Amino acid sequence: MTDVLPAQVSFVSASAGCTTTAGTVTCNFGTLAPSATQTFTIVVHIDSTRTGPIANTATVTAANATEDTNTGN
């Protein structure tokens, strides 16, 4: 999982297995079984002058992923 933090926040901490470099948090959790889940936490400090919502998007990628041919998923 990779999360480029918004400019309005400062990194504080993250779950074990996560690292941060220049505002980008990367978490590697190894192999997950089919239908398994993984939970992680990223803690940030919000700029005190910030008002309104802050958008944040994380990206998840899989190494050696098998393509799901079931288009109904």
Image: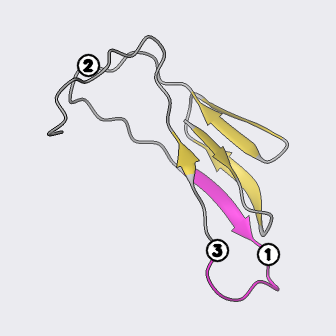
Pointer 3 with pointer 1, Cβ within 8 A: no
Local packing at callout 2 (Cα closer than 10 Å; few below 14, some 14-19, many 20+) is few
From the viewer's perspective, tell me whether residue 31 is left or right of residue 50.
left
From the viewer's perspective, tell me whether residue 27 is left or right of residue 19.
left
Tell which tag, 3 or 1, sits nearer the viewer. 3
Local packing at callout 3 (Cα closer than 10 Å; few below 14, some 14-19, many 20+) is few
Tell which tag, 2 or 1, sits nearer the viewer. 2
- Dividing the picture into quadrants, the one containing residue 70 is top left
Give the extent of the magenta segment: 42-54
Say which residue label 2 marks.
33
Say which residue label 3 marks.
54
Residue drawn at x 68%, y 60% is 44
Q: CA distance from mark 2 to mark 3?
A: 33 Å
Mark 3 belongs to which amino acid?
Ile
Q: Secondary structure at mark 2?
A: loop
In this rendering, is residue 72 above or below 36?
Answer: below
Residue 51 magenta-highlighted: yes
Circle nearer the N terminus (3, 1) = 1
Circle nearer the N terminus (2, 1) = 2
Mark 1 belongs to which amino acid?
Asp
- Secondary structure of the magenta portion, mostly? loop
Residue 42 in the image, given as x and y percentages of width and height: 58, 50
Residue drawn at x 36%, y 35% is 38
Residue 52 magenta-highlighted: yes
Q: In the image, which disc is placed on residue 66?
A: none
Mark 2 belongs to which amino acid?
Ala
Say which residue label 1 marks.
47
Residue drawn at x 49%, y 36% is 60
In this rendering, is residue 5 above or below 45?
Answer: above
Q: CA distance from mark 2 to mark 1?
A: 38 Å
Q: Secondary structure at mark 3?
A: loop
